[in-house]
Amino acid sequence: MKISTNTASESNSLAEQAYHLLEEQLVTLKLAPGELVGEKDLVDRAGIGRTPVREAIQRLSAEGLLQVLPRKGLMVTPLRRSDLAKIIEARRVLERLMVVKSAERATPDQRQALRTIAAHIEAADNDAEVFFRLNNRLGELLETACQNRFLAGALAAMQSQCRRLWYLRRNRLNLSRSAELHGGLARAVADGDGAGAIRALDETIATLESLVDGLDVLS
């Protein structure tokens, strides 16, 4: 049986929507680490059909945000200190490459978008929700500007795990300093200053490490 191009595209679009809706709930801890969830619950949360949600579950499982438990259903992956330390170790190396390549390859429109997001991030230093949303947008801009889909793909799951850490430890976060660092990172990339971008990135990674240090072995 041949599936029409339009039908296949619609199915892929719905799966993508389901993925983003559920990923957002996972990284913002609306679905808490260690929580047991059923497929039906995720279908209800996404408000999208079972088949697209199943595709989203497969992707989230592959990225380490969900765990499939035989005969039990699904569990939101716990935030483990040992896992996060390894994620940050890998992220430091890959993201340095990303910011350098973004500084080299960004288009004029992307550089302007980075300057705009920098200003918004710096203005949001007292609003955690706005800061987190803008920081996610900054990540998307860098993924596009680096012009390396393999690098962006390798970082995507690690960034989702680190976003969960931001939300979990938000009360320990120096939001003003974080906004300053992320704004500076965006400006450095926009200015083509790869070395400056690495310096700002290294400080943001150090912030993540400090948040991990305060975690219990299992959280």
Image (spheres, rainbow, N blue to C red):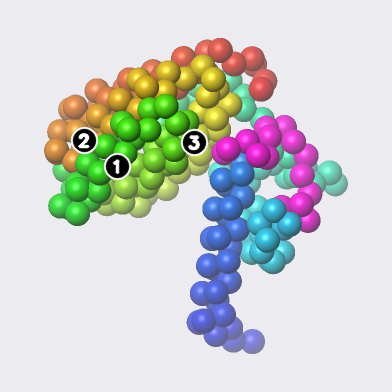
Q: Which residue is mark 2?
A: 187
Between circles 3 and 2, the one closer to the viewer is: 3
Query: Where does the image place residue 56, in percent across and percent down from the top left?
Result: 61, 56
Q: Which residue is mark 1?
A: 117
The three-letter code of the residue at mark 1 reads Ile
Give the vertical position of 37 relative to 203 (above or below): below
Which residue is found at the position 72% from the left and 58% from the top?
A: 43
Which residue is found at the position 58% from the left and 66% from the top?
A: 14
Between circles 1 and 2, the one closer to the viewer is: 1
**209 relative to 15 in the view: left or right:** left
Give the vertical position of 57 relative to 85 (above or below): below
Which residue is found at the position 59% from the left and 86% from the top?
A: 2
Give the vertical position of 151 relative to 219 (above or below): below
Work out which residue is located at the far right of the displayed protein and give it.
71
- Of marks 1 and 2, which one's residue comes earlier in the chain? 1
- Of marks 3 and 2, which one's residue comes earlier in the chain? 3
Do the residues under discs 1 and 3 have CB atoms within 8 angstroms?
no
Question: Which quadrant of the structure image shows residue 189?
Answer: top left
Q: Which residue is mark 3?
A: 129
| Residue 3 showing in the rendered view | yes
* Stretch in magenta: 27-42
Query: Where does the image place residue 116, in percent across and percent down from the top left?
Result: 25, 44
Question: Which quadrant of the structure image shows residue 80?
Answer: top right
